[in-house]
Amino acid sequence: MADERPNVLLFPFMAEGHIIPFLALAHHIEQKGYTVTFVNTPRNIKKLHQSLRPPPSSSIKLVEIPFNCADHGLPPEAENTNSGPYELFIRLIEATPALELPFRKLLSDLIETGEKPLCVVSDFFFGWAAEVAHEFGIFHSIFSGSSAFGMACCYSLRLNLPHRHTDNVEFSLPDFPEAGKVHVTQLPFPMLVAGENDPMTKFQRKNLPKWSSSDAFIFNTVEDLDRSGLSFFRRKLRIPVWPIGPLLLSRRDTGREETSSLEKCIEWLDKREPKSVLYISFGSQNTISASQMMNLAKTLDASSRGFIWVVRPPLETDINAEFAAEKWLPAGFTQRVHDEERGLIISTWAPQVEILAHESVAAFMSHCGWNSLLESLKNGVPLIGWPVAAEQFYNAKLLVEEVGVCVEVARGTKVEVREEDITEKIELVMGESEKGKRIRRRTAEVKEMIEAAMRDEGDYKASSVKAMQEFFAAAAKSCCC
Ligand code: UDP
């Protein structure tokens, strides 16, 4: 019997950092009684078939769209950019308009076989997708797995390049004054030096104006946490902007099944005092420089605080290379912290969600990727921010200046980070100062706020639940018109 449930077509950009939040969205939509068509390029679909455990249910169908890296002078592995060099990432983005034709054909085929989707939800890099969906009378929304505040800063910076019109190191965003002052150290390096000739800026100056052709924009965020960024897009795009988060990823969603480090971590954390451990991670694709890594290690060596540190090879080395502790960390560091049971060093994939949920964890030193921040706040863990790229600078800005749950320890991979500065920030967030206590109290409030956003009790629907309902209602209405 044909499946009568309405179908939502999801189409992320081909990178793990984009595919993972779309997968979380797929599971969320499935639980609401819809089926999902999850579209991506052949290599990514194959990878998803292999990695998802349990395999995708009948409610989530994985569908390939043709794309040949060689046609764009790219190596085959460029098709999923979680570990490739930045230049490949840019060239892949520049190749994405080539997906328009096969995407149009896919929609046409689905309609021919009676499988017209209720709506298309696509990546923010695919500005052209709204027009294609509309050609077939299909409702279209963009989805961002990042914060509205971070995206708003990026949107305004790319279109205005405000730093080109001032000699000051700090400046306001002309159409987003609520964001406060942006410092030049918070700009992506190529944008800072090349301005309108930076390839990403060139791409976005064509892509961003197309966003207002969409029917809606959904964000993996929470209204009360991310108010100014959401207001920016409501004002700017004049389309409904719905915060539907937090959609958090379980290991099932990502297909990451490594359990050895899970057991090891939990066993280690179980032996620690409540709220005593610092967790450190720079996310799935970022790392810091060799000298920064050395200074961070020296700080941890000199401190009595317990820690779990997810280390990756430093910049200028292959991020997927074997971790060479003897080369990149102080002599005897690994052995010492192990013998003294003071620290756990993980050089593979860490079970981050489970670590942050453990009662022994007191603070998270993070690169400020949005998923990491939501995971931390959902568990009431305050942050020590060390943003290194992209919108991470603005996520940190939001949490430091607007929300009050984070202190920034460093910015980027080019600055020297002194041991005493790292110690000061760690002690500020984990120690007994009044400011530290205030940050921890505020983090506990934000935890409540985030949990409250997903409350769905009878007639009471909290903001994110209502937003999702409004989204589906708008798609259904447009379908009937
Ligand atoms: N993550 C993890 N283990 C690791 C590194 C990352 O589980 O060793 C997960 C983390 O929980 C988060 C995601 O990978 O869900 C990283 O996303 P985020 O937006 O924080 O940063 P990105 O890696 O995209 O820069």
Image (cartoon, grey):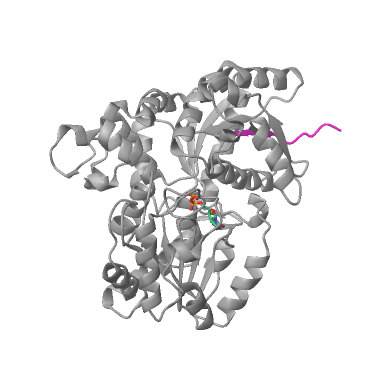
Would residue 10 be counted in the magenta stretch? yes
* Residue 83, position as x, y percentages in the image: 53, 44
369 to the left or right of 23: left
Residue appearing at x 43%, y 31% in the figure: 239
Q: Nearer the viewer, residue 376 or 301?
A: 301
**Closest to the observer, 441 or 349:** 349
Residue closest to the eye, 235 or 211: 211
Q: Is residue 102 magenta?
A: no
Where residue 30 sits: x, y (%)?
68, 44
Q: Could you tell me residue 11's position as x and y percent?
A: 59, 33
The total of numbered circles placed on residues is 0
Can the viewer see residue 61 in this picture? yes
435 in relation to 110, above or below: below
Q: Which residues are magenta?
A: 1-11
Q: Taking the image as drawn, is residue 124 in sight?
A: no
Q: Quadrant of residue 15?
A: top right
Q: What x and y, as percent, mark residue 305?
A: 41, 79
Tell me what residue is drawn at x 45 percent, y 35 percent. Answer: 240
In the rendered image, the residue lying farthest to the left is 167
Quadrant in which the N terminus is drawn: top right
Considering every residue shown, the one lying at the far right of the view is 1
Q: Where, quadrant-wise, is the C terminus in this rendering?
A: top right
| Residue displayed at 37% across by 45% down | 150
